[in-house]
Amino acid sequence: MELSSNYALPLPEDPIIVGFGGVGVDILAAVPSFPIPDSKIRTTHLKVQGGGNTGNALTSAARLGLKPRIISKVANDTQGRAVLEELKADGVDTSYFVVSKEGNSPFTYIIVDSQMNTRTCIHTAGYPSMVPEDLRQINLLSALNGARVAYFDGRMHESALAIAEEAFRQKISILIDAERPREGLNDLLTFADYVVCSEKFPQAWTEASSIPRALVSIMLRLPGLKFVIATLGKDGCIMLEKCVDEGHQLEEMDVDSSFESLTQRRDDSIAIPTCIASSLTRFRADGIGSISGRLYFGTAEKIPSSELIDTTGAGDAFIGAVLYAICAKLPPEKMLPFASYVAAANCRALGARSGLPYRTDPLLASFTQ
């Protein structure tokens, strides 16, 4: 397929999204190998850049053409002012930020190990933290006005819950980034329409013996959920989508066996992300329950080692693309490869935002058309 040089992703009819959670500054130090204790080493590269799950995910969404608004809190310090300036430059609406006259904005030291392709984060939380009283009701209503999706990364749970309750009342779809179990996350998840979680979260939250079984458990514990995705790093992702069986007699299958069957259909000769889907099935997890839906296995892009720079923010980039896909009404078969491509692009540069693609990237076309 020949792509026009002026190609751009189509703008969804409802492009406004709202995000609440962590923003801050990342100080990234790339080193040849992880330092041993009580040693001195030199960096190979150094970058200071905006970070935080919410800041990264909504920057990803903004570059893809959405119109994000962020509700969060920073201090009136050098880091806080830099956070706001960088987000504004990427088209993110920062008018709903709370700016504290005193205290400190969040920041994170990140050690990027070039030998093992890992990153280690040392986070300093912002102070004072955001509380529900920081956000006036009139500002909250304004922030949510016209929004298609509200995103939460699970931080500052009291404020997150207050915002989620209002979004739920307004029938705004809610996506939760479940990176790890956090205080107040269980209450927040009850409002979720969509959950995107890290590889470790499903089993940690459900105590199930496998990720596919855990996804069934999550779906049963959260009856309002439409889909749940677990990202698996270089191994891709797995998604369970709830479907109404409309009284049809569906084949019942063990969910672990079903997922194994999907992975065996993967074509390892294909480097770009792909998606393999099951038919509508009644998935069974013995000792947990069963649910009707479709199971999807999304492969990750095979990035040559010479091009793999930094995995910081890959999950946030993925979620930003999922937010776009929800607004653009992309089916899962397109959404998962699209999101995996965006995440892979971000891994080709240092930091959580340097490699995020823009909607004018012609390679995005093959995943959305």
Image (cartoon, rainbow, N blue to C red):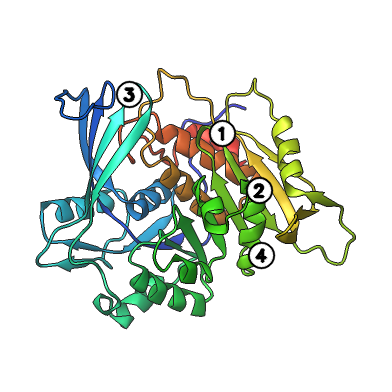
Mark 3: which amino acid? Ser
Locate residue 297: give its quadrant: top right
Q: Which of 171 and 362 is in front in this view?
A: 171
Residue assigned mark 4: 220
Pinpoint residue 308: horizontal percent, then vertical percent.
40, 25
Residue assigned mark 3: 114
Q: Which of marks 2 and 3 is in front?
A: 2
Q: Which of 174 and 285 is in front in this view?
A: 285
Locate residue 358: give its quadrant: top left
**Crowd rating for badge 2 (residues with CA inside 10 Å; few <14, some 14–19, many 20+):** many
Mark 1: which amino acid? Asp
Q: Which of 262 and 62 is in front in this view?
A: 262
Earlier along the polypeptide chain: callout 1 or callout 2? 2
Label 1 with label 2: CB-CB less than 8 Å: no
Locate residue 309: give its quadrant: top left
Residue assigned mark 2: 212
Residue assigned mark 1: 235
Q: Is residue 27 left or right of residue 90?
A: left
Say which residue appears at 21% left-offset and 34% top-offset. Answer: 47
Q: In this view, does 331 lie above or below 346?
A: below
| Residue 11 appears in the figure | no
Image quarter in which the C terminus is found: top right
Q: What element carries label 2?
A: helix
> How far is the residue under mark 2 from the one under mark 4?
13 Å
Label 2 with label 4: CB-CB less than 8 Å: no
Earlier along the polypeptide chain: callout 4 or callout 3? 3
> How far is the residue under mark 1 from the one under mark 2?
14 Å
Pinpoint residue 332: horizontal percent, then vertical percent.
64, 48
Q: What element carries label 3?
A: loop
